[in-house]
Image (cartoon, grey):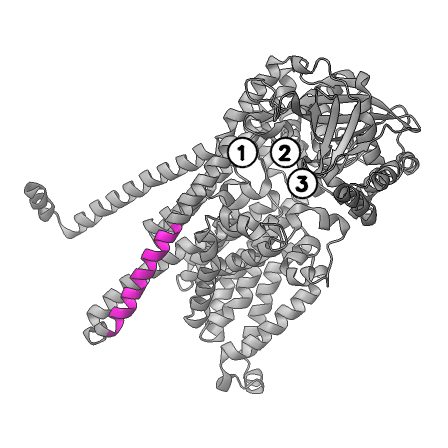
C-alpha cells in the first residue's frame, strides 16, 4: 500500500486528475451497464409466461400461427403489430397509403375503414417492421424503449448532476412500477416507448438555459432539444407535452430574470428549441408521416415570441414609465401579465387545439366539480378517470412510484420552481414545470401517471445533484471568505442532511417498487389469454383460429369496441370499432344496439349496411360451470368483461337507469325485475340464452377432456358467491340465432383445469350469434 501511495505521489496533479476522471467514468459506465441490464431483465420477465401459453396452445392442437398471438397483451400492441407487419410486407414508404381508400384498412371501423395516417404514429411500426419477424421485434420494442429511457436519463444526469443523481434516476426508472408498467415485453405502447425522447428534450433545454451566456454551445443544446421534441411528433401524442414544456418555460422565464434583456437572452434559446420542434413537426405532417395538430405545434414558438415581445415592450421608455417598471421591478409587473396570459390561454385552449381529454386534464378540478364534461364515451374510459375518484387510485399511484418517490415529486418540484423564481435559476424551469404539471394532471387523468412519475423521478434525482453542487460551490466560497464560514456551516450541514434523506427515501422507494414490479411481471400473461401465471385461458386464441380458418373473411364480427383489435388483427375479419375510439357515433350505435331490445338491435345493424346471415355478434365473459348440477353461473363480482362493461354501454347510450335496475335486481334478489330487464336488453338476452344451446358449444381447447359431457340445464346469475342466485331463463330470439359458443376452461401451465371446488370450474364463455334479419 505504501508503494502505491508513493507511486501516486510521483504523479503530477494533472495526471492524477486524468486518472481520477478515468476511474470515475469507468465506475459510472459499469454502474450504467448494471442498471440498464436490471431494467432489461425485469421487463423481459413476461416472455417466459407468453412462451408457456404458446406451447400450451400448440400442445392442444391450436396452430402456432395463432398461438404466437399470446405475446400481445392488452389492446394497443395488436394494432402496432398489424401496422409493423404491413410495413414489413409493403415497405416503410407504404405508411402514407394507410388511408380509408386502402382496402387493407377496411377491416377496421367497418364499413368505413380507418385512416391510420391521421390517427396513429409511425415510429413504432417502422421500427417493428425492420426485423425478420415483425411480431418478435414489435413485442420487444417497449423493452428497448425502457432501456433507452434508463440510459439517456442516466447519461444526461451524469454529465450535469453527477454519479449519485444518475444512479438514483437510473434505479428508479429501471424498477419502479410506474416506469415498467408501459415498457415491458408485449405491451407495445406509444407513451412508454417515447418517454426517453420527452426526457431528453426537457433535460437538453434545461442545460441550454444553464449555459445561456455560453454562445453557440447553448444554442446547439437548444436546437438538439427541439430536434428530439420534433421526433416525438411521429412517436406519440405526448408531443403536446413537449410543446407545453417549451411554451410554459417561455412564459415563466421573465419571472427568473434580472431585467428584460437578461430574459430575452434566455427566451431566444427557448425560441430556438420551440421553432426547431415546430418546423420538424410540420415537416413530418407535410410528408404524411406526422399526425400532430398544427395549432399545438404553433403554440410553443407563439408563446415564446409573445414573451419576447412583452420584454421588448418593457424596454420601451414610454411603456416602462406607464407601468412604473422602475418602482415595481420586472418580476412584479410581468407577474400580472403572466396571470392574465394564463387565464386567457385556458379560456382559448379549445380554439388553440388543446381540447377534449387534454384540456380536461389541465382543468380537472372543474371536471370533477361537474362544470366541464368529457362526453359519455370519455367518462367510460378508465385511463381518463381521475386518480382521486378511482377506488384506491391514489394509493395505487403512490405504490407504483414506490410510495416515497411519489410523495417527494410535488415537494421537490415546488422547491425547483422556488429556486428558479427566487434565485434566477431559469434552467430549473424545463424540469420543474412538467414535473409538477404532469403530477397535477395525473390526479385528473390516470393516463398521465407514467409520464408524471418518470419526469418526477428525474426531478428528484436532479435535485440531489443540485444540492450537492451548491455545497461544493459554497465550500469554495467560504475558503475565500473565512469570515462567513461560520454563517454557512449550518446551511451546508442542513443541505448535506437533506441529500442523505433524499437518497435514502429514493432507495427505499426503489426497493419497494422493485418488489411490486417483479411480482407483477413474473405473473403476467397476455390479457387475451388469462388473468395471470397458471391461470390461463385459450378461448380467444381458439376463437381467432376458428374465425380465421373456418369463417369467410368477408363476414364482419360485431363486438364491443374493446375487442376490435383482437378480432381484426387476429382473424382478419372486419370489426365495427376498436381501441382508437375515433368514431364516437359508431360506438354509440353499438351501445344502443347492445342495450336496446332485439328489434332495436336489428334496426341498427340494418342502418350500418350489414347483411343478414352474413353478420356475427360476439359477447364474452367469465363464469363458473358446475358439472354436478349442469349449471352455468355468472357472478358479477367475477366478471372481467361484457357483463360489467355493460355499464359503459348503458352510460354511452344514456340508459343508465336500465343498468341500475339490473344491479338492483342482483343486489335484492328480485327475479321479476331481472326478467323484465333481461327481456328488454339485447346483451343480457345473449348471456341468458346462449348457455342453453349446448349443441353449439365447443370446448376450447378440444383436449379438455373433463368437459366432454358439457351440458347446461340452468343458467344462474348472482352479485357474488354469498348472494342469492337468480335464474336466467331461455330466451325466444326473433332476429338472431346461436352460431357458436366457445367454453374455455381456465388452466395452469400444465394444462390442468382449475377447480375452486370439486366439479366446479372457471370458464370463459365466448358467445357468437348470427343475425338472421
On residue 80, the disc is 2
Horizontal arrangement in the rendering, residue 280 relative to residue 553 (left or right): left
Q: Would you place residue 715 above or below residue 476 in this image?
A: above
Q: Are marks 3 and 2 in contact (CB under 8 Å)?
A: no
Mark 2 to mark 1: distance in Å? Answer: 10 Å
Residue drawn at the location 44% of the way across and 65% of the way down: 415
Q: Does the magenta segment cover residue 2? A: no
Q: Is residue 640 visible?
A: no
**Residue at the spot of label 1:** 141
| First in residue order: circle 1 vs circle 3 | 3
Q: Is tag 3's residue or tag 2's residue first in the polypeptide sequence? A: 2
In the image, residue 42 above or below residue 278: above
Tell me where the magenta segment starts and ends, as one range. Answer: 487-506
Check disc 1 and report its element: helix, strand or loop.
helix
Q: Quadrant of residue 66?
A: top right
For marks 3 and 2, give the CA distance: 9 Å
Q: Nearer the viewer, residue 304 or 161?
A: 161
Q: Residue at x 35, y 53 (%)?
A: 503
Q: Is residue 489 above or below residue 104?
A: below
Q: Residue 701, position in %: x, y?
A: 67, 17
Mark drawn on residue 98: none
Residue drawn where x is 66% and y is 65% of the image: 346
Packing grade of label 3 (10 A; few <14, some 14-19, many >=20) is: many
Please say if the residues under marks 2 and 1 sit with CB atoms less than 8 Å apart.
yes
Quadrant (top left/top right/bottom left/bottom right) for the C terminus = top right
Q: Which residue is mark 3?
A: 120
The reply to whether residue 263 is visible in this rendering is: yes
- Tell me where residue 426 appears, x and y as whole percent: 45, 65
Chief secondary structure of the magenta portion: helix
Amino acid at each position: 500500500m505504501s508503494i502505491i501511495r508513493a507511486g501516486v505521489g510521483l504523479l503530477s496533479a494533472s495526471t492524477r486528475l486524468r486518472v481520477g476522471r478515468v476511474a470515475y467514468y469507468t465506475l459510472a459506465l459499469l454502474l450504467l451497464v448494471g442498471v440498464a441490464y436490471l431494467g432489461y431483465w425485469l421487463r423481459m420477465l413476461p416472455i417466459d409466461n407468453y412462451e408457456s401459453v404458446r406451447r400450451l396452445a400448440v400442445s392442444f392442437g391450436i396452430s402456432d400461427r395463432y398461438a404466437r398471438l399470446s405475446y400481445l397483451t392488452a389492446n394497443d400492441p395488436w394494432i402496432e403489430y398489424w401496422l409493423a407487419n404491413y410495413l414489413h410486407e409493403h415497405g416503410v414508404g407504404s405508411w402514407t397509403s394507410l388511408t380509408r381508400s386502402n382496402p387493407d384498412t377496411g377491416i377496421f371501423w367497418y364499413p368505413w375503414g380507418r385512416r391510420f395516417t391521421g390517427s396513429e404514429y409511425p415510429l413504432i411500426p417502422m421500427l417493428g417492421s425492420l426485423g425478420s419477424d415483425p411480431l418478435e421485434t414489435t413485442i420487444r420494442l417497449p423493452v428497448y424503449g425502457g432501456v433507452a429511457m434508463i440510459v439517456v436519463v442516466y447519461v444526461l444526469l451524469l454529465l450535469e448532476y453527477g454519479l449519485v443523481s444518475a444512479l438514483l434516476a437510473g434505479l428508479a426508472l429501471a424498477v419502479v412500477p410506474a416506469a415498467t408498467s408501459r415498457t415491458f415485453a408485449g405491451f407495445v405502447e406509444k407513451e412508454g416507448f417515447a418517454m426517453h425522447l420527452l426526457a431528453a428534450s426537457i433535460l437538453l433545454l434545461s442545460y441550454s438555459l444553464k449555459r445561456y451566456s455560453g454562445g453557440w454551445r447553448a444554442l446547439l443544446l437548444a436546437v438538439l432539444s427541439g430536434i428530439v421534441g420534433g421526433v416525438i411528433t411521429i412517436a406519440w401524442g405526448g408531443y403536446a407535452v413537449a410543446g407545453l414544456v417549451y411554451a410554459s418555460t417561455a412564459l415563466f422565464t421573465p419571472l427568473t430574470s434580472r431585467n428584460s434583456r437578461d430574459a430575452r437572452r434566455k427566451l431566444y434559446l427557448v425560441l430556438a428549441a420551440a421553432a426547431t420542434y415546430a418546423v420538424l413537426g410540420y415537416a413530418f405532417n407535410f410528408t404524411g408521416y406526422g399526425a400532430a395538430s398544427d395549432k399545438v405545434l404553433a403554440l410553443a414558438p407563439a408563446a415564446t415570441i409573445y414573451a419576447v415581445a412583452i420584454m421588448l415592450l418593457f424596454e420601451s421608455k414610454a411603456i416602462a414609465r406607464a407601468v412604473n417598471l422602475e418602482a415595481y421591478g420586472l418580476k412584479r409587473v410581468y407577474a400580472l401579465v403572466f396571470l392574465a396570459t394564463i387565464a386567457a390561454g385556458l379560456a382559448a385552449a379549445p380554439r388553440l387545439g388543446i381540447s377534449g381529454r387534454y384540456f380536461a386534464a389541465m382543468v380537472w378540478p372543474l371536471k370533477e366539480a361537474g362544470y366541464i364534461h368529457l362526453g359519455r364515451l370519455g367518462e367510460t374510459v378508465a385511463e381518463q378517470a381521475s386518480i382521486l375518484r378511482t377506488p384506491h387510485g391514489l394509493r395505487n399511484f403512490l405504490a407504483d412510484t414506490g410510495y416515497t418517490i411519489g410523495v417527494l415529486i410535488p415537494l421537490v418540484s415546488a422547491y425547483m420552481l422556488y429556486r428558479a423564481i427566487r434565485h434566477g435559476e431559469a434552467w430549473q424551469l424545463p424540469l420543474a414545470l412538467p414535473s409538477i404539471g404532469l403530477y397535477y394532471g395525473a390526479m385528473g387523468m390516470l393516463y398521465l401517471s407514467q409520464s408524471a412519475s418518470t419526469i418526477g423521478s428525474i426531478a428528484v434525482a436532479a435535485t440531489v445533484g443540485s444540492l450537492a453542487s451548491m455545497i461544493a460551490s459554497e465550500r469554495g466560497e467560504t475558503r475565500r471568505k473565512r469570515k462567513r464560514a461560520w454563517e454557512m456551516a449550518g446551511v451546508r450541514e442542513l443541505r448535506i442532511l437533506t441529500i442523505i434523506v433524499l437518497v435514502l427515501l429514493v432507495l427505499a422507494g426503489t426497493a419497494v417498487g422493485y418488489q411490486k414490479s417483479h411480482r407483477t411481471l413474473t405473473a403476467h400473461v397476455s390479457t387475451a389469454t388469462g388473468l395471470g401465471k397458471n391461470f390461463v385461458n385459450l378461448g380467444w386464441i381458439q376463437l381467432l383460429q376458428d374465425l380465421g380458418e373456418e369463417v369467410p373473411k368477408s363476414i364482419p364480427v360485431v363486438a364491443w369496441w374493446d375487442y376490435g383489435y383482437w378480432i381484426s388483427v387476429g382473424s382478419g375479419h372486419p370489426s365495427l370499432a376498436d381501441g382508437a375510439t375515433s368514431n364516437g357515433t359508431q360506438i354509440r350505435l353499438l351501445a344502443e344496439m347492445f342495450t336496446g331490445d332485439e328489434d332495436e338491435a336489428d334496426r341498427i345493424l340494418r342502418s350500418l349496411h350489414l347483411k343478414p346471415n352474413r353478420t356475427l355478434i360476439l359477447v364474452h365473459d367469465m363464469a363458473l360451470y358446475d358439472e354436478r348440477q349442469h349449471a352455468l353461473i355468472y357472478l358479477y363480482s367475477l366478471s372481467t368483461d361484457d357483463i360489467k362493461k355493460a355499464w359503459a354501454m348503458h352510460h354511452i347510450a344514456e340508459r343508465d337507469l336500465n343498468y341500475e335496475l339490473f344491479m338492483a335486481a342482483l343486489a335484492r334478489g328480485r327475479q321479476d325485475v331481472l326478467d323484465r330487464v333481461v327481456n328488454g336488453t339485447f346483451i343480457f338476452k345473449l348471456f341468458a340464452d346462449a348457455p342453453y344451446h349446448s349443441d353449439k358449444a365447443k370446448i376450447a381447447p378440444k383436449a379438455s377432456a373433463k368437459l366432454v359431457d358439457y351440458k347446461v340445464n340452468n343458467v344462474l346469475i348472482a352479485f357474488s358467491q354469498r348472494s342469492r342466485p337468480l335464474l336466467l331463463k331461455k330466451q325466444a330470439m326473433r332476429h338472431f340465432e346461436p352460431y357458436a359458443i366457445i367454453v374455455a376452461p381456465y388452466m395452469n401451465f400444465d394444462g390442468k383445469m382449475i377447480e375452486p371446488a370439486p366439479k366446479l370450474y372457471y370458464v370463459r364463455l365466448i358467445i357468437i350469434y348470427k343475425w338472421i334479419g
